[in-house]
Image (cartoon, rainbow, N blue to C red):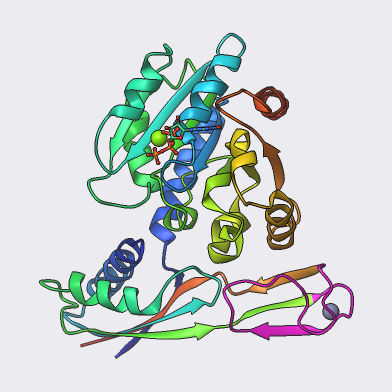
Amino acid sequence: MKIKIAAKILDANEKIAAENRQIFDNNKIFTINLMSSPGAGKTSLLEKTIKYLREKEKVGVIVGDIAGTDDALRINSLGVPVVQINTGGACHLDANMINNALEDIPINDINLLFIENVGNLVCPAEFNLGENIKVMILSLTEGHDKPLKYPLMFQKSSVLILNKIDLKPFLDVSIEKIKVDVTSLNPSIKIFEVSCKTNEGIENWTKWLQTLIS
Amino acid sequence: MHEFSIAESVISTAVEQCKKNGFSRVEKVRISLGSASGVMSEALLFAFDALKKETIAEEAILFIEANPLSGVCMNCLCNFTIYEPYILSCPYCQSNSFKINSGMEMNIIEIEVI
Ligand SMILES: Nc1nc2c(ncn2[C@@H]2O[C@H](COP(=O)(O)OP(=O)(O)OP(=O)(O)O)[C@@H](O)[C@H]2O)c(=O)[nH]1
Ligand SMILES: [Mg+2]
Ligand SMILES: [Zn+2]
């Protein structure tokens, strides 16, 4: 016999994401889901952003990696609360992992939560975590063909951080092409060019971020 | 790789619905995937067959319907449907202003149980 279901496949994830969002809203926490391929600079951007904002905002961080605690240790040394999630193989975070991690985050004491997703340019885009915005990083060394090869994350993000612009002189990469393609995929996306090495553009990004929180 | 998580969700929904309705085996599962959903059918079929073992869906066959990306152009007002993972400009007039109506979805349509 046939049973009609007509439901979203990721309905279970969506429901937990909505629960997480309720927790964030109730505690007045602005949450950012930070995504990129491995090594694009997620932890580096967090380090820089936290240095700029830690006097002004109360920041917390959840870091997802397949294994290891290196990233959490880097964040921990900045003196902000951090929880490491090891996905044990999964290539992305899901809402349930965040729900569990929230038990270890002092949610009454923070107003800005960064979630560093697992390094992967495809899978994390499918799973809502309950965040306010999705921010993705593309580093210049990855090449200007990436937006059209991996369109989904560019379509689902509200912000694109173009990182490692200090390396531009050494690369045959067209920032113009990246911007044209990304804007065609997602006309409302906001783009920042930054370097976590020279600090160029970091203040621009953090100032804009602050306008969202207050 | 995320096809594994998606397959897991499909199987748990199918198993849950089967039991809830008082049946004991899932025989077929029918789903639809938008062409811009970012999911690879082959990878999903592989994951489904790997994960169904030792559940009441272990004999189940997964049927995947491919849904096109569809939308409407704000410039020439045409309706378009394409089987591509993304769209950059209207297929008829090349305008960049269009609205996507469907193509990103992943839905379970129905299951067959005994
Ligand atoms: N030249 C240059 N190097 C950078 C920049 N940002 C990050 N890096 C380097 O890129 C490498 C990876 O940076 P991470 O911040 O660890 O990248 P990630 O995205 O957190 O990596 P995973 O968590 O492993 O996915 C490190 O060696 C950084 O020093 C930049 O703006 N310029
Ligand atoms: Mg990292
Ligand atoms: Zn048109």
- Residue A139 visible in the picture: no
The residue furthest front is: A170
Location of the N terminus of chain B by quadrant is bottom left
Location of the C terminus of chain B by quadrant is bottom left
Give the quarter of the image for residue A136.
top right
- Above/below status of A2 relative to A121: below
Residue B71, how many percent across, how many down? Answer: 72, 76
Residue A48, how many percent across, how many down? Answer: 54, 22
Q: Nearer the viewer, residue B89 or A92?
A: B89
The residue furthest right is: B75
The residue furthest left is: B54
- Above/below status of A186 relative to A17: below
Q: Which residues are magenta?
A: B73-97
In the picture, measured across the screen, residue B99 lies left or right of residue A102, that is: right
A178 part of magenta stretch: no
Give the quarter of the image for residue A140.
top right
In the picture, measured across the screen, residue B68 lies left or right of residue B16, that is: right
Q: Residue at x 78, y 77 (%)?
A: B90
Q: Nearer the viewer, residue A185 or B64?
A: A185
**Chief secondary structure of the magenta span?**
loop
Q: Residue at x 43, y 41 (%)?
A: A39
Q: How many marks?
A: 0
Residue A33, how many percent across, how many down? Answer: 51, 40
Give the quarter of the image for residue B16.
bottom left
- Residue A49 visible in the picture: yes
Q: Nearer the viewer, residue B52 or B90?
A: B90
B88 part of magenta stretch: yes
Q: Residue at x 44, y 22 (%)?
A: A107
Q: Residue at x 67, y 54 (%)?
A: A178
Image quarter for ligand 3 = bottom right
